[in-house]
Image (spheres, rainbow, N blue to C red):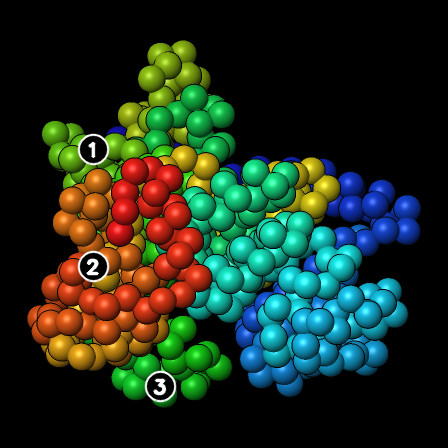
Amino acid sequence: MGVVRIHTSWFRERDAVQIYDDLIRYSSEGRDIRVGLVGAGFMGRGIVEVLEMTPGMTVSVVSDIEVERAQACFELVGISRIREIEHPGDAAKLDLGRERIICSDHRVVTALDGIDMVIEATGKPDVGAEVAHAALMQGKHVGMLNVETDVTAGYYLNSLARERGLVYTVCAGDEPAAVKELIDFARICGFTIVAAGKGKNNPLDRTATPESLSERARSMGLNPYILTEFVDGSKTIVEMACVANAAGLTVDVRNMHGPSANIDTLTNVFRLRENSGILEREGVVDFVIGDLAPGVFAVVRHEGPIANETLRYLKVGDGPNYLLYRPYHLTNLEVPDSVGWAVLHGKPTLATVTIPSTEVITIAKRNLKRGEVIDSFGGYTVYGGIEKVEQARSEHLLPLGLSVGSELLEDVEMGRVITYDQVRLKDSSLLKFRRIQDGMHGRDS
């Protein structure tokens, strides 16, 4: 069987050239896209730097619960004219053309007049929901780096944005948008998606905790909770659910296969069982552990006899499966692309426009006791799994985004999936929006 290595980074680069030219024209007219950022961690700092280097874009305000981190974002790029605002009511008095704003209250960002787009980069699902909703209600586009929010209530938030003539989008740079780019490219060319996903670049350890990874996190300069979310697999689950929901794909099995594979073997691994592969069905998301990381992939096939003859003639392989892949994703460095498309052309990079096809479910990381409160993503109590949405509904499985802060009503054994019936949900804006979303496709939580 042939292995086809079609490198598709040019697809994004082609689009980036177009938006770059548009931004140059926009800037030459004396205008800037004004961006507000919520979350000044590692990703946020990078966003400020790259947006400030992009023509036609300005970061006008940065919010973080540790306001010193927001200030550092501006100081690191040489901006010293900074003003701190404490109350959202003071936002209307500001002249964004004269000074940059920092705040600890994200409501200041969404209340500011003159902001074109709000980027949410906290990674906290409840905060992400509040910020996105408030921004949309105040007439601002929304760029999400907070995929945890998107897989919980992104369908509703995108529907709200469209109703208001705005853009809600998961931003370019992280794996979901990079995978969706490959899927779109493949479909334009007439390919059928067999499987699409990402390479995982660290070992999978479902029992990992911030304590067990503390030294490693310190050496890498990372928050241990963020590292834990990667190592226990929750981040990969969230990202692949985001792709599936936006692209209309599903999963082959609960929690995906996650095989060890490399670029040379992907097309053999991701094929139907009847053809000596691992799949019961096509059109799925998955991940691999191997040399593809930090890249993304799509295993595809083509029904056209002339197309397959062309592929053989071009010496890209014998088929029937072909590999499209991108060997990198540049995280926050690619965010300007999404900002430009959203503000100048009203186009999202990635958004769920139909009823979600998958659910991120909640699984006990250890034996849990009645009365315990579930902590955050990448914490000590639970990790994320993925299931087809119909199955998740029939089993009343608890979405991971709603689990945070919920109290257990009974003991749950390690490795067991947690249901709605086993918890007292924490009241939050995210829960409210999720219930609206569930009602949009005929389900009440």
**Nearer the camera: disc 2 or disc 1:** 2
Of the 4 image quadrants, the one containing the N terminus is top left
Label 2 amino acid? Tyr
> Callout 3: 10 Å neighbours few (<14), some, many (20+)?
some
Q: Residue at x 36, y 67 (%)?
A: 427
State which quadrant residue 440 falls in. top left
Instruction: Please state which of residues 95 and 263 is positioned toward the viewer in this rendering.
Output: 95
Residue 241, horizontal then vertical, whole percent:
34, 49
Q: Which mark, residue 420?
A: 2
The residue carrying mark 1 is 281
- Helix, strand or loop for disc 3: helix
Instruction: Please state which of residues 412 and 317 is positioned toward the viewer in this rendering.
Output: 412
State which quadrant residue 343 falls in. top right
Q: Earlier in the sequence, mark 2 or mark 1?
A: 1
Label 1 amino acid? Arg
Mark-to-mark CA distance, 3 and 2: 32 Å
Instruction: Please state which of residues 376 and 24 is positioned toward the viewer in this rendering.
Output: 376
Instruction: Please state which of residues 1 and 110 is positioned toward the viewer in this rendering.
Output: 110
- Helix, strand or loop for disc 1: loop
- Of all residues, the one furthest to the top in this rendering is 306
- Give the side of residue 196 with respect to residue 369, left or right: right
Q: Residue at x 48, y 59 (%)?
A: 129
Label 3 amino acid? Ser
Q: Which mark, residue 232?
A: none
Residue 62, horizontal then vertical, whole percent:
67, 71
Residues at circles 2 and 1 in contact by the CB criterion of under 8 Å: no
Mark-to-mark CA distance, 3 and 1: 40 Å
